[in-house]
Image: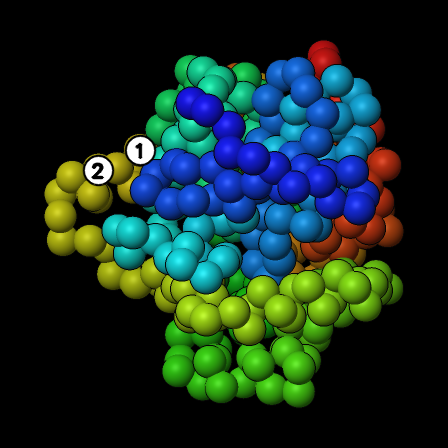
Amino acid sequence: MPKTSSTLLPDGIRQRTVRANNLDFPVLEAGSGPLVLCMHGFPDHARSWIPLLKLLADAGYWAVAPFMRGFWPGGGAPDGSYRAAATGLAVLALISSLGRTDADLIGHDFGARAVYAAASLDPTRVRKLVGLAVPHGPQLGRAFVANGDQQRRSWYMFFFQTQLAEVAVPLDDYAFIDRLWREWSPGFVLSLEDRAALHAMFAEPGVLSQTLSYYRQLFAAPSADIATQDLEARASCLIQVPSLYLHGAQDNCMSPDLSDGIEAVFSKGLQKIVLPGVGHFLHLEQPEEVAKRILEFLKS
C-alpha cells in the first residue's frame, strides 16, 4: 500500500495517517526494520510512546504508534464497536496497511486488550507479544465483580457508565484526567506540554464520548448476533505466541495481583515481570528499563 506523506516532528518522530479498517489512523513512527506496533490506552494517546519509539528505532526496529479508534475527531468506530474483537481486527488491519504480513505487538491498558485480541484472532500475524499494565484472561472480569480492592481502584469505570462523565471530565481543564494520572502513577508528573496535548485531544469534537464507549461497552450486554458473539469469544481465547507481561508494582489502577496465574492462558510461554518503583504508566516512568526488558525479549 502506498505511504501517505509524513510530517517530521521536532523530536525526530514522523507523523502521518494510515488507512485501515475504514478509518484514517493518525500514526507516529520512527526507524526502519521489523515492524513493532505500539497501542496506547486511556486516558492516553500515541504521544506517550515517543520515548519507546526512539529506543526501538535505535535498536533496529520500525516502531509505529497509532492512535486507537475513537481518539481523534472523525475517528469513531465505523461499526460502532470498541469491544476487544473490533480493536484486535483494527490492529491486524494496520499491519496489512503498513505493508507487512506480521509484526511484534506492544499494548498498554486498552491497547494491551487490543493486541491480546489480535494475537488470539490470528496468531500467524504476530511474531511476539508484549502486554503492559492490564493482564489477559478471565481473572480481570472476576475482579470487577468479586474483588473489593480492584472495585475501589476501578471506581472511574463505573462512573463512566453514567452521563455525568461527559460533564465531569472536562471541568477545570480536564482535572479529572490529571487526577487519574496522579493516582495511577504516584510520584510521576506528566510534563506541561504533554498534559496540554492530552487535554486538547479530549476537547476535540466527539473524542470524549467516543473514548468513554470503551468502558460503556466493556460492561454492556453481549451482542445478540451469534457471529459477533463467536468473534468476541475467539478474541479472548488462549494466546499462542511467545509473550512478555510487564506491570508496575505501584500501579494504583490495576493491581499487580491480577496477573497471578495468567501463565495458564499463554500456551507458547510467558515471561512476567513486576517492575519496582513504577505505576500504571511504566513506559513513561522508566522508558529505558521498559525498553531494555522488551528488547531482550524481542531479540531472544
Report whether 18 appears left or right of 172: left
* Render colour scheme: rainbow
Note whether residue 11 is visible: yes
SS class, disc 1: helix
Count numbered badges in the picture.
2
Quadrant showing the C terminus: top right
Q: Position of residue 177 (x, y in %)?
A: 64, 72
Residue 37 — which label?
none
Asked whether the residues under the numbered discs 2 and 1 touch, taking CB atoms below 8 Å apart as contact, a structural biologist would say yes
Residue 230 — which label?
2
Taking the spot 45% from the left edge, 85% from the top edge, the residue there is 164
Amino acid type, label 2: Asp
The residue labelled by disc 1 is 234
Report whether 183 appears left or right of 91: right
Amino acid type, label 1: Arg
Quarter of the figure with residue 247: top right
Report whether 295 appears left or right of 73: right
Note whether residue 283 is visible: no
Q: Position of residue 212 (x, y in %)?
A: 45, 67
